[in-house]
Image (cartoon, coloured by chain):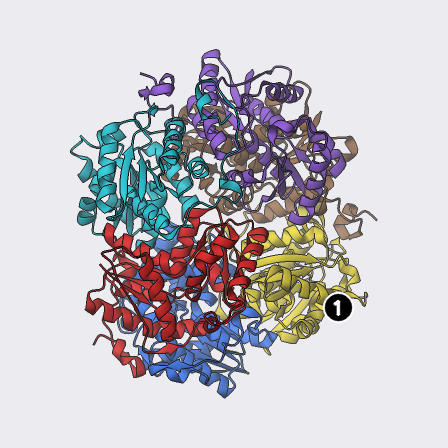
Chain colours: A brown, B yellow, C blue, D red, E cyan, F purple
Amino acid sequence: MRIRVINPNTTASMTTLIEASARAVAGPGTVVEAVTPAMGPVSIESHYDEALAVPGLLAEVIAGERDGVDGYVIACFGDPGLDAAREVAAGPVVGIAEAAMHAAMLAGRGFSVVTTLGRTAGRAHDLAQRYVAAGGCRGVHACEIPVLELESDPTVLPRVVDLARAALESDGSDVIVLGCAGMAALCADVSKQVGVPVIDGVTAATLLVQSLVTLGVHTSKRDEYARPEPKRYTGTLAAFGTT
Amino acid sequence: MRIRVINPNTTASMTTLIEASARAVAGPGTVVEAVTPAMGPVSIESHYDEALAVPGLLAEVIAGERDGVDGYVIACFGDPGLDAAREVAAGPVVGIAEAAMHAAMLAGRGFSVVTTLGRTAGRAHDLAQRYVAAGGCRGVHACEIPVLELESDPTVLPRVVDLARAALESDGSDVIVLGCAGMAALCADVSKQVGVPVIDGVTAATLLVQSLVTLGVHTSKRDEYARPEPKRYTGTLAAFGTT
Amino acid sequence: MRIRVINPNTTASMTTLIEASARAVAGPGTVVEAVTPAMGPVSIESHYDEALAVPGLLAEVIAGERDGVDGYVIACFGDPGLDAAREVAAGPVVGIAEAAMHAAMLAGRGFSVVTTLGRTAGRAHDLAQRYVAAGGCRGVHACEIPVLELESDPTVLPRVVDLARAALESDGSDVIVLGCAGMAALCADVSKQVGVPVIDGVTAATLLVQSLVTLGVHTSKRDEYARPEPKRYTGTLAAFGTT
Amino acid sequence: MRIRVINPNTTASMTTLIEASARAVAGPGTVVEAVTPAMGPVSIESHYDEALAVPGLLAEVIAGERDGVDGYVIACFGDPGLDAAREVAAGPVVGIAEAAMHAAMLAGRGFSVVTTLGRTAGRAHDLAQRYVAAGGCRGVHACEIPVLELESDPTVLPRVVDLARAALESDGSDVIVLGCAGMAALCADVSKQVGVPVIDGVTAATLLVQSLVTLGVHTSKRDEYARPEPKRYTGTLAAFGTT
Amino acid sequence: MRIRVINPNTTASMTTLIEASARAVAGPGTVVEAVTPAMGPVSIESHYDEALAVPGLLAEVIAGERDGVDGYVIACFGDPGLDAAREVAAGPVVGIAEAAMHAAMLAGRGFSVVTTLGRTAGRAHDLAQRYVAAGGCRGVHACEIPVLELESDPTVLPRVVDLARAALESDGSDVIVLGCAGMAALCADVSKQVGVPVIDGVTAATLLVQSLVTLGVHTSKRDEYARPEPKRYTGTLAAFGTT
Amino acid sequence: MRIRVINPNTTASMTTLIEASARAVAGPGTVVEAVTPAMGPVSIESHYDEALAVPGLLAEVIAGERDGVDGYVIACFGDPGLDAAREVAAGPVVGIAEAAMHAAMLAGRGFSVVTTLGRTAGRAHDLAQRYVAAGGCRGVHACEIPVLELESDPTVLPRVVDLARAALESDGSDVIVLGCAGMAALCADVSKQVGVPVIDGVTAATLLVQSLVTLGVHTSKRDEYARPEPKRYTGTLAAFGTT
């Protein structure tokens, strides 16, 4: 089976990291290919960035459908364009926030999210309200390190560990969810130091997509996620139209 | 004061209708200008259309900020790009679903939405969950008339009236919300025939924005809706970057 | 159009302040008249006071209907008698807690209420549960200054400012709602000092009623808010009966 | 122990019926006294009636405190004045909707309310949201018989039975709650014919108050239900003031 | 009437204490008999203990049905086996967490639970979500004293009092619920020292069962709580089968 | 890796079927072993059956821990003993209702459960409230075929198909969840005939456990799911004690 992991920002080095994480957990029969969109923001740190990451991401899904891709991972913790991608794709599409929150609910009673910038906390809460039962997401905590500095900043690991420990105490949670695809590489170290399950969405989503494809479970095309109506698009985005 | 009403689809005749509705209710000191984006879908009938309407819409907000606009209405019932627009704009931004649902909650105990296509019902429910108290939105009902046929199809009024009457009965609701900017012109007729308040979001949102500007209430710039971080964008959307 | 702003307590000096606030924002064609009930408590600081303010308030609505009033504001943050007033009035009726909470939800993601006495916090939470989506009201904080001392106590402004700042931090909110009609005059100063939108319900409600009248949106008379059945009343309240 | 059952309307024959129901279940050491207020509506069938029933009801609680009453039942299904009465009384105060809904949740998984007029259904839903866990109240159904005709109309029993049966089916409920104090006498007959537990609030509330007094559990006077602040009242209601 | 109070653990001295509490509040016509199961854990401090306490508890209910018992109290704060016992018993069955939480909601606006071990807090929150309206249970606080040391440890009272005081402050609650049957004897002392109502579930449940029996309200046998289907059981538990 | 799938009832032929389903989806490195408990009911169709299935199930988990099992599936749609099993096991434990509901939420916007007996619907709703976001489970529908007749009754498939079609219409759902482990074999046929994703929990849970083990995500041992305290057990269940 072929799973396309889409990094919705346009920073290729981050795509490389994401691909490595996804490949590390995929089963023997699964081909994981990570892609970088041809347009959009170099990192996603606001609703504005997230909205403008979606066209590039959808172009990758449209291309994937032509290429016979079996399922998709959206590898940004805001899960941008998830609903639209589900309309376009024949197979399953899973966001990494969605996957991480699902996994967290199987590992404990309530989780805390440790993320990059505080301004994205509202989005994390919105997603939790959509994905998990009430009371599952018990807090969102930011280390205030910009996404593109996660790789290079040597203080990231200790700061995330400290934040995770404090979150468990203040929130009464028992699982940590990492709130950025760029934190995937930290997962094992944080878990070892903090002593509770720590969930990275990239690996969790890759295995969820692999499982859904194995089960033959695609997105329901009844009503909401039916393929978009054919229609004319204008201007710079004309190529997204179907007539 | 100057209010920009953005029709997020690229059909200019619909912008004209929306402008007429908005102007009909604006106060004497309010200048209403409706605009059509330079790119995007000719109508919005799916998550895909909605996501791809946002770049064109945000371009209009960015332009409006340069032009000294005081507040914005997003005139599509899916309220596309609302969060992103709030980050970009200094003044208030209100979506027509948001405005209509707020007004409906002041006019009765629970409302039914009468909309165009059934596939958009999930989006309406999602917005209701975000905007109003639990139990406020009691049902979403579709007449299955595509957006661009609303103007020309003579059966629209009787079908909307029938649907509204049935919705009040089945949902136990006491107010009707029209679920498409293209239905604005029907509002008074439906209300007269059905005998309950019927809310059109275009007029409701225009007056809400006018009121917020009068009150001096802008979007809070604390955390989530702070202006987006300056950042490079690539490819077709490079112009949305700030460096 | 004619809007009657009812101060549900019997302190005329407070009515004067409320009237000034309301008139300052009303449109050119709107006549605002604030009234003081002929019976009831001099201030409202408990469920007991609130319950006993309602007969005097309803008498003003009944009188307003005879006088051709187009809409009503209930200018006490507990919104006393709102449901009953909606049954009696032909036009819209809006409470100031209702209006302030609606406006707050358009200005940010979550608000904190800063109010007078801690014992009224439960009522504020109850109203928030009815008026806004879950998670909107993130905290209620009391300065413990009695209603009738708000005007004369020079420490009110700094205490409200301090409380507002602390509330934003502890609640993770981004908007402040003033929890008493008697705080209306502080609104601009608190907002300037705290740096986030601060909502006063008197002005917010006046503009909401004005907007609803402009839109032609009255209270739905289907079922719950139909005019009360004619009926005999006895004793001191006999005048409220209709036979 | 002495329990005062207050019929909040001013129809003495209904007070007599209520007293009989309450006395039939009270323990040997319990004195039940039902009272009729000196002012207010002859029946309660709207928010207006309910609001104007409260002064007369509170006068009975104030008198009860002077008389050494140990606890109170508010015998109207809208539970008018419950919060205010809890501030005034030293001992427990229980409303009949509250008691009936609590009992129903101990007898099954979800209940349907069978009540008099459809216009009161919204109030029943509001009370259920306050009193019981989500999903407990599964429907409210009205026989459209005015309160004062319950006693004389011979079709009441069969209509209530039919409505109860239909409600169990349509709502998927397993318990019936009678939605009016005037239906207390029907309770055993409806239960026998319908075959599920049927709850009358008058008897349920009487035993709850008796139990709370036995347990020594009074209303908490911390914050919200503390005794009202002493204060001047004006006009017709001046007697309710304390200075 | 005959009420069987089942202590689901197998420590007879605790049964004796529970029986004394229950008898102290029961009415003159009520016979209270407390029983200890013949199998199971000596105390219940985990989901594992709770699950394995249920067979012994159900055996006592089955025996009670043969003995003509009118109603049952399950005297462990986790309310183990409540649903199963309701299927087996003809009369009412009430858990002590259920009873305590119901009573607390009649005594104030929100309660805090003070319990033994922190690991049981999740269970208390789950029960609160099932039994009471949202917002009723405002916190669960553990003194970390094992159940079987409650009787002998002289520091229990002061620690519970301190914890209760802190909980009222931090949770903004106004009632305390004791989270273990073994704390029943502390109830009056804690209430006196803390100054708010303190609820013990053993006494509360005994009076609720007594009231339900007096009202003639049994568990609804429609659907979910119908008697279990006759069926073969195997192995050590074969005696629980009916064929 | 080694996954133990526990059929909580004692019917070995059902265990065989479950094992086949689980093995069909497991990855190449995964050993699936299905087990039948040594004690308990031959089928689970009530709370009573479910409660009494737990000791036998826990014995299998305890044995599995000795045997080096990596993770467990609880293969009954009521997910009996899930919390207790999580305390006992070092690795992940997933129930089939839990897994099916998680998968359904990734495949559409809302699901309907098609199950065996109507009396179990309440349990399904309770589990949905715990596992998925509000609004996810839109209905539970029973074909009223006892669990042990699923295998032999030739009308099962057409009845389940009809029920599924009706459920999608009446509930407005877009995914079907099969509500019994005994329906696993029907999954592909129902999906083909109904045209939407149909989820069987046995396969879904097997892949979830496999994924969690691959991710290194075990149950958090912080607080609630810590290993049970060592303790004496008495009577027939003495073997479950640890001293």
Looking at the image, residue A240 lies above or below residue B219: above
Amino acid marked by disc 1? Leu
* Number of numbered labels in the structure image: 1
Looking at the picture, tell me which residue is in the foreground, F67 or B120: F67
List the single residue furthest toward the left. Answer: E154
Q: Position of residue B223 (x, y in %)?
A: 47, 50
Which residue occupies the extreme bottom position in the image? C67
Q: Residue at x 37, y 52 (%)?
A: E215
In the picture as drawn, the residue positioned furthest to the top comes out as: F67
Return the residue nearer the eye: E27 or D78. E27
Q: Is residue C164 visible?
A: no
Q: Is residue A182 toward the left or the right of residue A40 in the image?
A: left
Quadrant of the rendered image containing residue A65: top right
At 32% from the left and 55% from the top, the residue drawn is: D207
Tell me the residue at 59%/53% (across/down). D170
Q: Where is mark 1, residue-wise? A: B157
**Disc 1 chain ID:** B
Label 1: element kind: helix
Label 1 Cα crowd, 10 Å radius (few <14 / some 14-19 / many 20+): some
Q: Position of residue D54 (x, y in %)?
A: 35, 72
Q: In this image, E28 relative to B176: left or right?
A: left
Image coordinates of residue B214 in percent, x first then y, are 51, 71
Residue B182 in view here = yes
State the quadrant of the N terminus of chain E. top left
Q: Position of residue F209 (x, y in %)?
A: 55, 24
Vertical placement of residue A28 versus B49, above or below:
above
Farthest right residue in view: A243
- Name the residue nearer the viewer: D145 or C212: D145
Q: Residue at x 58, y 60 (%)?
A: B98
